[in-house]
């Protein structure tokens, strides 16, 4: 996080909502590595990943006025927008079969906490890594395919050549285990984010110009997160 | 109403082998039991169709399942945290600034054939070059301002998007013949925006000239100094937010510190 601006994420978004481009630049400096890193993890193409990260951060600028901290943390909001855009880009050029090991092998599921992560986010990321690392491999693959690549259980069953029921069970068991571990670790009350309602269906992921709808009836948070 | 419990997610039922037809099985479930069977997919955003609709309908009336989905959704969100960070290509911030400004150079319209036939090609080329320069310079100002913590004071606001659409450009032409050059030689460009706030941006290049110079603008028949800048090795680029609307600027001058006019630019109305 190479931003010299010490304002909180929420304060920066508030300033961005008023049109403060300097706050926007500070925000971009703060999140560009995370947005680009996530897009690159999913897409593996630096040029396309930059486009996705750019678009994600442009959307945070445009929708800063309607950001609602009760529905998602800023980090979650930015990463979810990035993920959804990356999945859309992936679906448009789905020529190369995806492999969750591409992400797993990037070292994200490491038992060794990343020092920079610890410094920046109070090792919340390391805790999530540990939780994910404790999930059996086949469940982890299903989780990664769903969380990062946006695959449905049916698509995972085809991808992994397993029955649909098995795919659904792996997703359920894997996420349940992560949830239990993080809850036991107190993560939901700590550095991660306030709890929120469920995600939108991943297809289609991102409308052309999403318009976050403040105060919309539950569970239309999906627009907020797009 | 069955209460979803962590036990439902605690073991790896999938390890025991395939469970074909679970979708059909889910179809026979109802209430909280059904919701518990699809909650993880809902949290991950991968639940679609009738199952998704049914799950959302159930959520509306069940506090316990709402609590469950809240925790599962937080866990699903947390997964994205573990993606490794990576440095984007250089210039990412500048390109981002360019994208939030619809009137930046990238969005400049191509010259019309009619304008080209009328001999306006050079003018349009100059305008587009200046617009690109304006966008880059403004971006640099904001980035530099943000870096040293004064960006809020100098950064153009959202209104600049409109202002950049009203850029007036003029060629900065030499007055002095001290270096042997002919008067009237183009030595730079000036751009002035209208709107609030208004900006003036100037680029100046003439080999052999170095040191501090000042910028004087004329508005409403009066001339006043609006700032100073330095030329290094004969080159300087400078920008400033004007105290009043740039729409009324009729000319801009570069003067040395003794007040002698080095170059001037006149804006067409």
Image (cartoon, coloured by chain):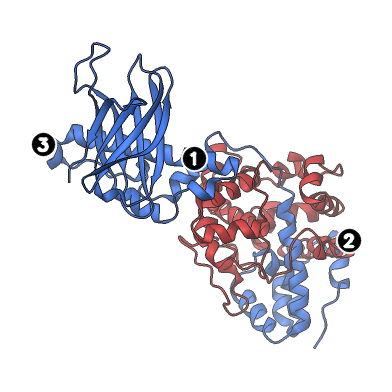
Name which of mark 1 and mark 3 comes first in the sequence.
Answer: 1
Task: Find the distance from the CA under tag 1 to the CA under tag 3.
Answer: 35 Å
- Location of mark 1 (residue): B94
Within 10 Å of disc 1 (Cα), the crowding (few <14, some 14-19, many 20+) is some
Q: Could you say whether the residue bearing mark 1 is in a helix, strand or loop? A: helix
Q: Colour of chain B?
A: blue
Q: Is residue A94 visible?
A: no
The residue drawn where x is 31% and y is 30% is B254
Per the rendering, the colour in which chain A appears is: red
Of the pair B139 and B187, the residue shown nearer to us: B187
Figure quadrant of residue B262: top left
> From what the image shows, is residue B28 above or below residue B213?
below
Distance CA(mark 2)–CA(mark 1): 40 Å
Residue at 54%, 51% in the rendered image: A24
Q: Nearer the viewer, mark 1 or mark 3?
A: 1
The image shows residue A211 at horizontal and vertical percentages of 49, 67
Q: Is residue A208 above or below residue A4?
A: below
For the residues bearing labels 1 and 3, Cβ distance under 8 angstroms: no
Q: Chain of mark 1?
A: B
Disc assigned to residue A185: 2
């Amino acid at each position: 996080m190479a931003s010299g601006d010490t304002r909180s994420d929420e304060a920066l978004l508030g300033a961005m909502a008023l049109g403060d481009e300097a706050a926007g630049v500070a925000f971009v400096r703060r999140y560009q590595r995370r947005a680009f890193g996530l897009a690159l993890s999913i897409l593996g193409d630096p040029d396309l990943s930059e486009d996705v990260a750019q678009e994600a951060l442009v959307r945070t600028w445009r929708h800063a006025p309607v950001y609602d901290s009760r529905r998602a943390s800023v980090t979650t909001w930015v990463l979810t927008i990035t993920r959804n855009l990356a999945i859309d880009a992936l679906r448009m050029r789905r020529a190369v079969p995806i492999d969750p090991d591409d992400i797993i092998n990037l070292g994200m599921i490491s038992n060794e906490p990343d020092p920079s992560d610890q410094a920046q986010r109070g090792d919340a990321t390391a805790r999530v890594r540990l939780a994910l690392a404790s999930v059996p491999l086949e469940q982890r693959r299903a989780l990664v395919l769903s969380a990062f690549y946006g695959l449905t259980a049916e698509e995972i069953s085809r991808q992994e050549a397993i029955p649909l029921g098995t795919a659904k069970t792996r997703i359920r068991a894997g996420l349940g285990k992560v949830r239990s571990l993080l809850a036991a670790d107190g993560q939901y009350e700590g550095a991660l984010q306030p709890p929120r309602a469920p995600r939108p269906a991943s297809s289609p992921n991102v409308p052309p110009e999403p318009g976050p709808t403040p105060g919309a009836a539950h569970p239309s948070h999906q627009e907020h997160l797009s | 109403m069955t209460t979803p419990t962590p036990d439902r997610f605690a073991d790896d039922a999938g390890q025991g082998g395939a469970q074909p037809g679970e979708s059909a099985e889910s179809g026979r479930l109802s209430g909280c039991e059904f919701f518990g069977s699809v909650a993880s997919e809902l949290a991950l955003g991968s639940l679609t169709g009738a199952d998704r609709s049914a799950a959302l309908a159930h959520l509306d009336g069940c506090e316990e399942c709402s609590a469950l989905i809240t925790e599962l959704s937080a866990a699903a969100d947390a997964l994205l945290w573990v993606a490794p960070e990576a440095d984007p290509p250089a210039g990412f911030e500048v390109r981002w600034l360019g994208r939030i400004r619809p009137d930046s150079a990238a969005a400049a319209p191509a010259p019309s054939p009619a304008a080209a036939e009328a001999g306006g090609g050079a003018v349009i080329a100059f305008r587009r070059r200046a617009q690109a320069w304006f966008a880059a310079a403004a971006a640099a100002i904001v980035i530099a301002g943000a870096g040293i913590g004064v960006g809020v004071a100098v950064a153009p606001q959202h209104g600049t998007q409109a202002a950049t659409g009203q850029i007036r450009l003029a060629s900065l032409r030499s007055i002095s013949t001290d270096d042997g050059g002919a008067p009237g030689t183009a030595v730079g460009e000036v751009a002035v925006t209208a709107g609030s706030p208004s900006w003036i941006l100037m680029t100046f290049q003439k080999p052999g000239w170095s040191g501090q110079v000042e910028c004087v603008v004329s508005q409403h028949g009066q001339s006043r100094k609006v700032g100073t800048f330095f030329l290094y090795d004969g080159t300087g680029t400078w920008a400033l937010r004007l105290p009043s609307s740039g729409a009324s600027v009729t000319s801009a001058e570069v003067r040395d510190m003794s007040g002698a006019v080095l170059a001037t630019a006149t804006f067409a109305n």
